[in-house]
Amino acid sequence: MALYGYTVGDTDVSSAPGNQFQVYRFLIPPASTTAPKTITPGLVGTVTVASINNPDLEGLGTNPSTNRISAVNEPRKSGSPTIDPTVIRINNIDQPFAPASASPTRSPSDLRRFGFDSGADFGRDFSSTGQILSTNVLYTIGGSSTGTVGSSLYKITVPGTGAGTLTLVDKFGAATTVAQRQGTQPTNPGKFVDSLAIDNLNPGRTRAIAGDFSTADKDGAQLYKVDLFTGQLSAPISVKTPSGQALNVNADSGLAFTNLSGSTQRLLAFLETGAIYEITGFQDELNATGLSLGSATGSNGAGFATARLIGQVNLPNASTGATDYEGFTIVNE
């Protein structure tokens, strides 16, 4: 068994009907890696999505019950005035490759997702009282780093192979507004994220991390703890290099936990350039009580996590930006 990362390129790869995206698989470097490894990915298959306004598959998550991968498209195409006209969830884009599309039913029917970027991951569901349930759902987060900056968390129920239901996770602060429900205002204003990772080795409503490695929102690389019951993001956790400098990569990203039983939990970030970073120092955030805490009471003492470059995946056109690889998930195979 070994850990493999998966990502999707968002450039249409042929002239066939529908938007087509290539899925790539690559070996995850071990935690003992001391120098960045050059990694050659393998092409898994091609996903074909009917022509829609926003086809970029930016959110990837691995279902811990089935070990299969699902993808969620971004909320809306950059530059488009239309708010999230179609929600697409595509499952089983791993090996063996057997994609099946499902577009969740919105609840309420006028619900629209916020933002231009997104991340996704599977995690346990929570009841109206915040108690953990045995069922897995696909969480997806939408964010915008320009214009109205912010993020909102959503949940897609997965009843067997059905399409499921999409809802906004918003149970903190004031009641949800019409603008928040219809995707024109975020439920977490001023906090942009485009990636999401959930710790399924130690399930809990705040065992999740969202990431922002872009500097377009003028606040540098940051992580946030996520409350999966309320949809609330914590205070920002700055991401630094091993030498203590602010990480300055300015790239869209994906986040994933290894979720490997019997092993120390690892958190990895994957940038659209193909760079893989090992994130340490996040443990204090997961164990801290409440969502107003950074690492101020933890071992770091200064509210930061450390990112160490451990690999570079040589993906087609990633270095030029012609193809974006923003979704990221890990499977134990």
Image: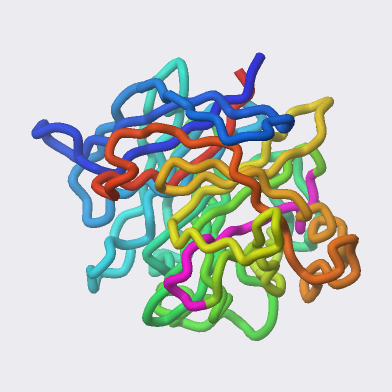
Q: Quadrant of residue 41?
A: top left
Q: Nearer the viewer, residue 257 or 170?
A: 257
Task: Tell me the residue at 40%/20% (across/down).
Answer: 97
Tell me the residue at 65%/43% (across/down). Answer: 278
Quadrant holding the N terminus: top right
Asked whether the viewer can see residue 241, the reply is: yes
Residue sitting at the far left: 15
Coordinates of residue 267 in the picture (x, y in percent)? 68, 44
Query: What type of secondary structure mainly makes up the magenta span?
Result: loop
Chain part drawn in magenta? 203-218
79 vs 50, nearest the viewer: 79
Image color mode: rainbow
Q: Is residue 89 above or below residue 126?
A: above
Looking at the rendered image, the quarter that the C terminus falls into is top right
Depth order, front residue of 5/302 = 302
Identify the residue at image location x=45%, y=15%. 96
Can residue 137 be seen here? no
215 falls in the magenta region: yes
Q: How many marks?
A: 0
**Quadrant of the image occupied by residue 89:** top left
Estimate the x, y position of residue 215 in percent, counting from the top left.
47, 69
Q: Is residue 240 magenta?
A: no
In the depicted structure, whether residue 308 falls above or below residue 177: above
Residue 146 pos. (x, y %): 39, 76
> Residue 242 at x, y = what percent?
70, 53
